Image: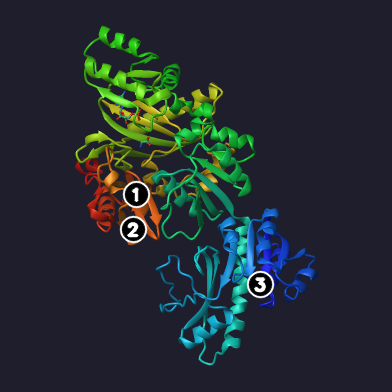
Amino acid sequence: MKKIAVLISNKGTGTNLQAIINGVKSGEIKAEIAVVISDTSEALGLSRARKNKIPIKIVPKKEDLLPVLKKLNLDFVCLAGWKQIILDEVITAFPNKILNLHPGFIPDSIKGKVLNPDGNEGLWNKGKLANQAIQNFLDSKSTYAGSSIHYLTLEFDFGPVLARVFEKIKPEDNIDSLYARLKVKENKMYTDVLAELSVSKTVMVIDGGGRGAALVDKYTQSDKVGKILAVPGNDLMSVNCKKTVVTFQHLKTTSIAEILQICKKEKVDLVDVAQDNAVEAGLVDKLTKAGIKAFGPTKAAGQIEWDKSWARNFMVKYKIPTPEFHVFKSEDKGIDFVKKDPDKQWFVKASGLAEGKGAISAKNTSETIDAIKQMSKFGISGKTYLLEEWLIGEEFSAFALCDGEDFQIVGFAQDHKRVNDGDKGPNTGGMGCVSNPKVISAECRVQSADIFKKTINGLRKEGRPYKGVLYLGGIIVKGKVWVIEFNARWGDPEAQVLLPSIKNDLYEICLAIISGNIKKTKIIIDKKVRVAVALCAKGYPIDYSKAKGKLVYGIEKAAVKIYGAGIKKIDGSYVVSGGRVLYVVGEGDNVIDARRAAYSAISEIKIQGNHMHYRRDIGWRDINR
Ligand code: AMP
Ligand code: GLY
């Protein structure tokens, strides 16, 4: 049950308080009014609280409010007439928890505007009290009056808008007649907003990049989810989003103690552990132990990603197609080995997590020795390393939602790892991708499904049931699928193209997986082709320091999905903060249309001083096929 406080002053008559009381009594608002607070015992609304046996607290000094609120462990604070006297420290202490009703139309962005139902511009009435605002609607000959409920932020009369109401102005209206009609709508709006918030869930996403943004975007589409927290998140998790998204950018995905603390304080209903290092750190295990629902594999199940030598041995045991491999724990042993069997081509791989940089290709013995010598730069992750047979073929990735026992494949994608067109230049974290690529034949689907089946069954038999998203990195060699690697999470940027194709409520899917019901869940995937293009800072992945801090223009104009990654918002403007700045995702009935949508959106985006780089050929294989 959610806990709310209502703050009233002697400015009003307490009709909003009464509406909230009625909503709670009727069961529409599933919350308890823990307290009604006023700065004066004269406030008219207090009698309404008394009549309903709601505790009352008189806090005459505004400086005393914060400690009072802090003690109550509240979910929401509803203001009625308090906004003028509330201190900034209270607003800062309760981000996205303090609701306020403003007698005007607050836009979604500071430079935005709200249109009335007839298309005329609605008045913001910034800084105006109720009566002045109504007068302003009349004086300005507005066609509509109206109000907004928003979360209080330090920005005056602004903040995420939860709802708005419109009331048509009649020629004969005066302040009283207009306000009387508007008030009825305002009271209902307050009840409706609280009714929704009182049952809405809070989800936390553990990720900071484009994949995290795609997940946040997906959770904002859930009717059940009201608020999304992202650790660490970034400043462009969601464009034009009506729901509350809070980021914790000072934290890491492995800041376990802090994450647990936030989950308790914010009463988080579900944590989506989306990043590999958080899986390795055992975040899912620790959350589950603390009684917090977590989506993602346990540390033991996730070993399939964070320990590549363990994973290869597992694949052998369960007859999952794996290339020849050899595991070494010292530089010398590996070097001796390659010297004995010269002129083979190898992939030299750190066994542990290495931010996607741990695999080095080697065309001959001297390159192999050189690669082995580089393993030490991965620290503990490179202490054990593998020599793997270099498979030549076409790569793809496949994704399955697994509940420990069963799984459903939700899509295939093809990443573009190299920085330049034509798959040239150094490897990157991913320059773009396509779903579903044409290379995925019916036969490839069958083989991938067989690999998933063996993997899920094998992990279960090993006492490590796998729950969450399982990523199969595959390569097709002469029609046969081999496993390059497994990852214990969505791919990045694959999530950016696959998540939008899922038509189900992601929150519900996660609950189904956690409770072992993936088989019974009908997952609906649309048939669209999607192309994600990574917009990078010039110089990425080597040195993009010159691009850092440069302004990014044109994001708001884009007509497609945009997911932020290495981006910050400073004084209302976006600036570059990382190598892969953002992802633009185009969709269409075929790859040509999807590419056109992505690239035409990109043409609207600029980075100051042209410090921008992106591949122009994402999806090239599918165009030529
Ligand atoms: P990984 O770090 O395992 O994701 O590997 C990075 C990339 O190296 C993969 O996406 C493949 O392109 C390539 N790769 C890794 N292992 C092999 C292999 N055994 N044969 C061919 N290519 C490989
Ligand atoms: N797309 C590559 C990865 O997520 O590891």
Whole-percent x and y of residue 474? 34, 30
- Asked if the residue at tag 2 contacts the one at tag 1, i.e. Cβ–Cβ closer than 8 Å, the answer is yes
The amino acid type, in three-letter code, at marker 2 is: Ile
Earlier along the polypeptide chain: callout 3 or callout 1? 3
**Residue in the foreground of this view, choosing between 67 and 103:** 67
Q: Amino acid at mark 3?
A: Asn
Q: Position of residue 445 (x, y in %)?
A: 36, 34
| x 57%, y 41%: residue | 258
Q: Which quarter of the rendering shows the C terminus?
A: top left
**Label 3 sits on residue:** 16
Q: Position of residue 105 (x, y in %)?
A: 49, 73
Q: Which callout, 2 or 3, points at the residue further toward the start of the chain?
A: 3
Q: Is residue 263 left or right of residue 334?
A: right
Instruction: Judge from the rendering whether residue 362 lies leftward or rightward of residue 202; answer left or right.
Output: left
Q: Reading the chain from its start, which is encountered first: label 1 or label 2?
A: 2
User: Going 61% across and 70% down the picture, which residue do you hit?
Assistant: 85
Q: Is mark 3 within 8 Å of ligand 2?
A: no
Tag 1: residue type? Leu
State whether residue 378 is above or below residue 559: above
Instruction: Name the secondary structure under disc 1.
Output: strand
For this rendering, which residue is in front, 428 or 571? 571
The residue wearing badge 2 is 555
| Residue highlighted by disc 1 | 582
